[in-house]
Amino acid sequence: MTTPPEQSPSPSALIDARIAELGDWRGETLANLRSLVLEALPEAVEEWKWRGVPVWYDHGMVVTGETYKASVKMTFAKGAALPDPHGLFNASLEGNVRRAIDFFEGDPINRPALIELFRAAGALNRAKPAKAKKQT
């Protein structure tokens, strides 16, 4: 009789634990942002990367949810290619690919605008052409 290998917690369980571990406005903010990602992209897959960063995928990476001492940062993998009619992006503006939104304690969350941005990011991933297969 063999003993089954211990199963690692799922990425969703690890994200739940991070939210609980934070236990302050950052955990609450991350939980709210997570719910918006999953509302906007119901088929999104949650992952746990880079020693503790929640990441959401929908046909590719959409956004990460990083927590710092003074902020919660949502970094959009292809943010530079996304329209931002509501002016949500306020960080990582100098790069050619990513864009981010830093949330600080007490900042309001523009739910409709964020849902629109998450949906646009998912649509951008779905619209990318398939990579050509290498000829052998």
Image: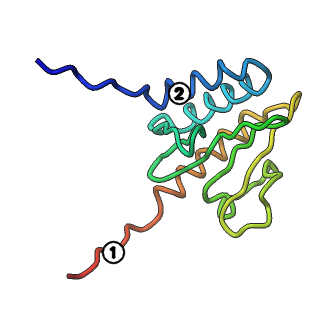
**Dot 2, how many residues are within 10 Å of its Cα: few (below 14), some (14-19), or many (20+)?**
some
82 with respect to 44 (left or right) = right
Residue 78, given in percent of the width and then of the height, sits at 61, 59
Disc 1 from disc 2: Cα separation: 35 Å
Residue 74, located in which quarter of the rendered image?
top right
Q: Which is closer to the viewer, label 1 or label 2?
A: 2
* 23 shown above or below 115: above
- The x, y position of residue 66, in whole percent, is 68, 40
Q: Judge from the rendering whether residue 102 lies leftward or rightward of residue 136; answer left or right.
A: right
Disc 1 to disc 2: CB gap under 8 Å = no
Name the foreground residue: 121 vs 21: 21
Tell me the residue at 81%/34% (across/down). Answer: 69
Q: Name the residue that disc number 1 marks.
A: 132
Kind of residue indicated by mark 1: Ala
Q: Please, is residue 59 above or below residue 103 in the view?
A: below
The amino acid at mark 2 is Leu
Q: Which colour scheme is used?
A: rainbow
Which residue is rendered at x = 27% and y = 26% of the image?
A: 5
Report the quarter where the C terminus lies.
bottom left
Question: Mark 2 falls on what kind of element?
Answer: helix
Q: Which residue is drawn at 52% across and 51% down?
A: 61
Across and down, in percent, residue 98 comes to 67, 60
- In the image, which disc is placed on residue 9? none
Q: Mark 2 points at which residue?
A: 14
